Amino acid sequence: MSAAAEPARRGERIWVALDSASQSDRALEVAALLAHRERAELAGLFVEDVDLLRLAGLPLASEISPISAMLRPLGFAELERQLRSQAAGLERELARLARGAGLTWSFQVRRGKPLAEAMALPAADVMVIAGRRPAAPLPPAHGRVPRAARGAVIVLQDASPAAARTLALARELTVRLGATLEVVAAATEPAAGTRPAGPPREPPGRLARAAGAVLDAQARRADALLVLSARDPAAATRELLEDLLPALHCPLVLA
């Protein structure tokens, strides 16, 4: 479903990827802000997690009632109904934000694995991935008190062709959100005696491990917003995201 408003520039879309475990409010807010900045279409994707649906099909599947806090049976049909209801609510909220900003919007529902469906979206578009809802209150990262009043925009500075554009986007988000800017360097030094001739090249697997180790702690900060360079089909980028998303409690922008 979509609604017409001011035409999007160059046909660009700002995607916001959501599923049943998403903390959607801040991700929708960031996506709407980016769509307004680019005069782009605000596009929502809700993924019905196929693994969750398979689990609901098992004979002993159950859930905790939000009213009684007791276990109750959860069948496949009941979970489908809940997912449809959740998707409809998110669509209404996305439409409200888009209309308020005078933007075109669209919303679609797919069934599959959330990361795979998100990564299948057009690589030229900017995407916001919503963080997960924590099962329990999160402790401050490294013993620090989260800066909830302003938050932090954390950008991974890598050597990709989109690095300069990504950093500029992160700086603008910092201003618009009234946050602080933190830059994480992705490059690592080569081992002694192994420096190659010509421009340095970072081994993809090593880059993923080095960046992932730093970003994992940042992803747990509910006051943060992570910004990474454009999606790359390389396995290293996919592996980094697979490692990062389970710990992601803040929105992630892939620009």
Image: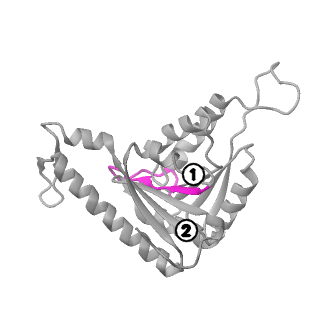
What residue is rendered at 26% in x and 62% in y? 85
> Which residue does the numbered mark 1 point to in the structure image?
122
Give the structural element (helix, strand or loop) at label 2.
Answer: strand
Q: Residue 210, image x and y in percent?
A: 63, 34
Q: Residue 89, image x and y in percent?
A: 32, 67
What residue is rendered at 16% in x and 41% in y? 61
Residue 142: in sight, yes or no?
A: no
C-alpha span from label 1 to label 2? 13 Å
Pointer 1 local density, CA inside 10 Å: few below 14, some 14–19, many at least 20: few
Say how the picture is coloured: one colour
Specify the amino acid type for callout 2: Glu
Of 133 and 122, the residue lying toward us: 122
Q: Residue 250, image x and y in percent?
A: 48, 55
Residue at the outermost top position = 193
Of 243 and 38, the residue lying toward us: 38
Question: In the rendered view, does 35 fall on the left or right side of 199?
Answer: left
Q: Which mark is residue 41?
A: 2
Give the structural element (helix, strand or loop) at label 1.
Answer: loop
Specify the amino acid type for callout 1: Pro
What residue is rendered at 75% in x and 43% in y? 159
In magenta, the rendered stretch is 125-146
Q: Residue 252, image x and y in percent?
A: 53, 53
**Which image quarter is the N terminus in?**
bottom left
